[in-house]
Structures are given as structure tokens and as C-alpha cells.
Amino acid sequence: MSDEMSFADYESRLDRSIKVKAPDFSTGERLRHLIFSGQFTRPMLDKLCRLADKIRLLAKSNEGHRFLNTLLSHKRAMLYFTQPSTRTFMSFAAACQILGMTCNEVRDLSVSSEAKGESPFDSMRMFSSYFDLVIMRSHIPKFAECCGYMMNHLASTQQRSVPILNAGAGSDEHPTQALLDIYTIQRAFSFTDPKDSRQWTRYDELRESFPGLRKGIVGKTIGFCGDIRRGRTVRSLAQLLALHDQIRLVFVSPAHPTLALPRDLKDKLIDAKVDVRECHSLLDTFDGKPLIEQLDALYMTRIQREHNSAEEEAELKDLDYSQFKLTKSLVARMKPYAAILHPFPRDKEFGEIPPAIDEDPRAHYFRQARNGMWARAALVAHIFDVDGEINDYHEQYNSERQIAPQ
Ligand code: CP
């Protein structure tokens, strides 16, 4: 392979299954790069969620915050985002800062030498010269994956190489969104409450009405509503939910091939023993009961109109979308503990979740966005192998303060 990289160098690797590719992006049990959500195993997910909880707790105190801040103060991160982002960009920057890293950014190619004809691969090598981590949302499909291969090649030839984190681009996957979604769902299904005491817990109270209710994701019914086929977050999250037992996933979308559940994802989920249902309205019933009353969580999505071809634009504009929007009266019928999620941005014109729902305790989407910061801090700590130090410090911190393990 020449030193001047191009897509042609990687083409033959891109079409392999994720199972075959995943070892290219890990060193043993530890991720070297994060490109796909399929790289997460169930034990790894559980470990990252526990680590995110510990970082969240430690960051609340001055002392814990100072400790976290020393961990990676010798490292620098480049945030290379050439597609729009609010949450992923900000929460990654905040996550790096929590761990003491300094950050720099390229968000506009007109101020980069790519505007003078530099190849994106050369740009990436320059980033790896000055920084220790590249977090990227590129406009070029599969570019994060190719950069992972390029960094591996550089490492194998004793040249400078840094980890690559895919921050979700185009129709590629969005693995860190899936991580923060799982973290949010796990927290929602811990059924804890700040008022929990020896005499009363929210979980015990819920079990009076729902005797079979179990903590955690196992056995839950989770709905996805809206643009199922084009929602990269739906694809990534559904596959992580499939790592849990007895999961039922209900996909609610207009019956149009541009928006409905794609066959390949459906087959993957069925192979993973997920009970997959499809319906075409939030008002539908299944197994003789209204869908909305059966959901433990509902993941709303935006209809991604910006991806419509001219033909799709014409076909999709006349669909009736009213049954893919949440209303206060629908939320009132949901279980009292059900979690409403949305990766955001929501579409203020379309109105899949009107702001009138924001104050409902079941609305988790702002907490979900904040969880992105803790989950991404856990991921960065894992990548740089400082998770052990956080675990040790947290144990000592708890024992000094006699905080019961969560
Ligand atoms: N959820 C998400 O990826 O949001 P941004 O596009 O704002 O980063």
C-alpha cells in the first residue's frame, strides 16, 4: 500500500460483515476505533454504562471533578465535523474536557486546506500528527471506517496512529448515539427515584400495578416511530437492544418503502430472536390491546425530508402523518413508567413531539441528550485505558463516603 491513501485501498474491506470487520477495530477486549454499533458486546455495553454512572457521580464533587480532569490532561482531541451537529459535537467536546483533554475542531471545509485540494486522507494524517484522538462526522460515506483502516496501516508500519470515533455521518451508523440511548433506557428502567427510602421505593410502588415488572432492558416492549428506514439511530439502537433477552420491538411507520422497516434489519433482528412487529399507526392494536398502552419505551424519530429524491418528495408529501406524531392524549395512555426518547433534533414544523409533552415525567429526551456526555466520556476513558483508574477511585470515594453501590 502506498503512503498516499485513497478509497480504492479500502474498497474490498468495506463490504465484509461487521462480525468479520470488528476485530480490525479492537485490541483484545478493548476498542481501538469505534465505527459501528455492532462492535459493542453486551458485557462491554454494561461496563460502559456502569463507567458512565461513576463519571457522572464523580463529576458532581470538586474533588472527583479534579481527579477526572487529570486523567487525560496530556491528550488532545480533534473534532472533525463537516456535517451539521449540535448534540454529538458539544457532548463529545464536554466529555473530552471532563477527562482533561484539550479539543480543537474543523467544522467548515472552507477554512481547511481541503479547500485548496488536499485529500481528506491527508487531512486525517495531519490531525493524527497533532492530536491523540479524532472524532469525526464526515460528509463522505464510510470515511470513518476507511480512516480506521488507514490508522491501522500506519500503526503496522510504526508510524503515528490515533483512535477514530465515528460520530454518525450521513446514512452510516451512529454508534455513540446507540450507546447513549442504551444508557438512557437502562437508567429509565432502574426505576429509582430521589425520594427512594427504606420505607418506600418507586420500584415497589410500580410493582403494585405491574407485578411482573423487572428492572433492566430484558423483557421490555420498545416502539420506534417515524422514519424507520433512514434513521441511522434506529438501526444502531435496535441492534444493541437485540443483545438483550426477550425483547419485543414494534416499528411504527407509514407503509412506504422509503420509511418502513428495511428487510435486512428485520432479518437481523429475527435472527437475534427479537419479537419484531410492524404497524402503521400509533393508534394500532396488537395481540388485542392498544399498542400505545403496551410500550415500555417509545423512540420517536424525525422524518428526514432532506434525503428525499424528487420522486420520493412527490410520493411522500401526500401521506397522512398524523398517526406518527405524539400527542398529550396519547402520552396519557402510556404506562406511568414508560420512557419517551428522541435522538433529536426534532422537527418543529412536523411536530413529532410537541413541546407541550416536555414537562411530562415520561419525556426523557433532554436527559437522553445530557447522558450523551457521560456515555461519551466513558467511551473515551475506555479507549485510553483509564477506566480501571476511574473504577478504583470510585470505589475508594464511595467507601470514604459510605455510598451504597448503585
Ligand atoms: N442526535 C444527534 O446526532 O444530534 P446532532 O445531529 O445535533 O449531533
Image (spheres, rainbow, N blue to C red):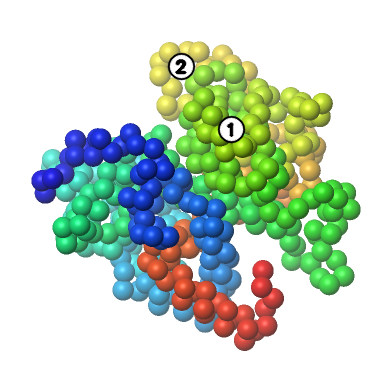
- Check disc 1: other Cα within 10 Å, few if <14, some if 14-19, many if 20+: few
- Check disc 2: other Cα within 10 Å, few if <14, some if 14-19, many if 20+: few
The single residue placed furthest to the bottom in the displayed view is: 400
Q: Residue at x 13, y 40 (%)?
A: 117
Q: Residue at x 20, y 57 (%)?
A: 156
Look at label 1 and name its amino acid: Ile
Q: Residue at x 31, y 37 (%)?
A: 14
Question: Image quarter for residue 110?
Answer: top left
Is 373 in front, or is 262? 262
Confirm whether residue 95 shows in the render.
no
Question: Image quarter for residue 99?
Answer: bottom left
Which residue is identified by label 1?
A: 270
Which residue is identified by label 2?
A: 312
Is 129 in front, or is 162? 162
The image shows residue 347, relative to residue 182, as above or below, that is above
Look at label 2 and name its amino acid: Glu
Is 154 in front, or is 134? 154
x and y, in percent, of residue 86 in the image: 44, 48
* Screen quadrant of the N terminus: top left
The image shows residue 300, relative to residue 60, as above or below, that is above
* Screen quadrant of the C terminus: bottom right
Cβ atoms at labels 1 and 2 below 8 Å apart: no
Q: Is residue 71 left or right of residue 42?
A: left
x and y, in percent, of residue 20 in the image: 37, 43
Q: Residue at x 35, y 59 (%)?
A: 27
Q: Is mark 2 within 8 Å of ligand 1?
A: no
**What mark, if any, has residue 178 been given in the picture?**
none
x and y, in percent, of residue 203 in the image: 80, 58
CA separation in Å, label 1 and label 2: 29 Å
Q: Is mark 1 within 8 Å of ligand 1?
A: no
| Mark 2, secondary structure of its residue | helix
